[in-house]
Amino acid sequence: MEAILELDRVSRFYGRGRGTVHALRDLDARLYAHSLTAVMGPSGSGKSTFLQCAAGLDRPSSGTVRLGGQEISAMGERQLTRLRRARIGFVFQSFNLLPTLTAQENVLLPLRLDGKPRDPARARRMLARVGLDGRADARPGELSGGQQQRVAIARALITEPDVVFADEPTGALDADTAAGVLGLLRESVTAYGATVVVVTHDAAVAARADRVLRLAEGRLVYDTVGAAA
């Protein structure tokens, strides 16, 4: 199986001396194409730092991160910005939609920022795929939390990225709505061939994942695949 994202001996620490905080400690991980991986662990375990380093939002203090065989941990900020726009999608707990834009305009925003042609028909098709047919002109304030998260997922998929990172995507939703969003992330893998990495506290996410990574005190302590996940 092809490893789309590789972390080799990645450490991340903050501060100096006795006040140093070791968020990640010599972490090795391989994340595979066309799969859903859940990254779990208690608060302070390093989950968010893992996401930030893996997605090029933060630089490891040591070690390397490679996306599609290309080392991103040594890139300059401009290179990283271009890479994130073109090859990485993000879904956040707080949705991060622009309130003055319609659903369609929010979905097209990554293409606009990357200087690529904006295709409204493509955005509407993507919204229809996530169950929002006919809501392209609605603004975030006119949508429920679950619908806003669906817009965020459509926005993350519009560039056909190598990896979609989802940070607690069900955390702000009720159980039924969260189940629908989780099903959509699962479908994005099976139907569209996406690679999804979900940072979560939710055991229901782990139950639907192809693989579960569990962190504790910045270390990878559990890694399992298949039905055992």
Image (cartoon, rainbow, N blue to C red):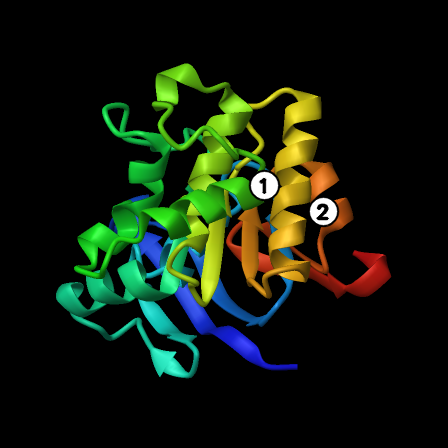
Q: Quadrant of the N terminus?
A: bottom right
Disc 1 secondary structure class: loop
Q: Disc number at residue 206?
A: 2
On residue 200, the disc is 1
In the picture, the disc for residue 229 is none
The spot of residue 202 in percent (x, y) is 66, 36
Query: In the picture shown, does residue 183 fall above or below 70?
Result: above
Give the residue displayed 48% in from the left and 41% down from the top.
127
Q: What x and y, as percent, mark residue 159?
A: 37, 59
Q: Position of residue 109 (x, y in %)?
A: 26, 45
Vertical order, 150 against 197 (above or below): above
Amino acid at the residue labelled 2: Ala
User: Going from the N terminus, do you reach mark 1 or mark 2 first?
Assistant: 1
Name the residue type under label 1.
Thr
Q: Is residue 128 visible?
A: yes
Residue in view at x 31 percent, y 73 percent: 72
User: Looking at the picture, how far across and down is residue 215, in whole percent?
Assistant: 59, 52
Left or right: residue 80 compared with residue 78: right
- Nearer-the-camera pick, 113 or 93: 113
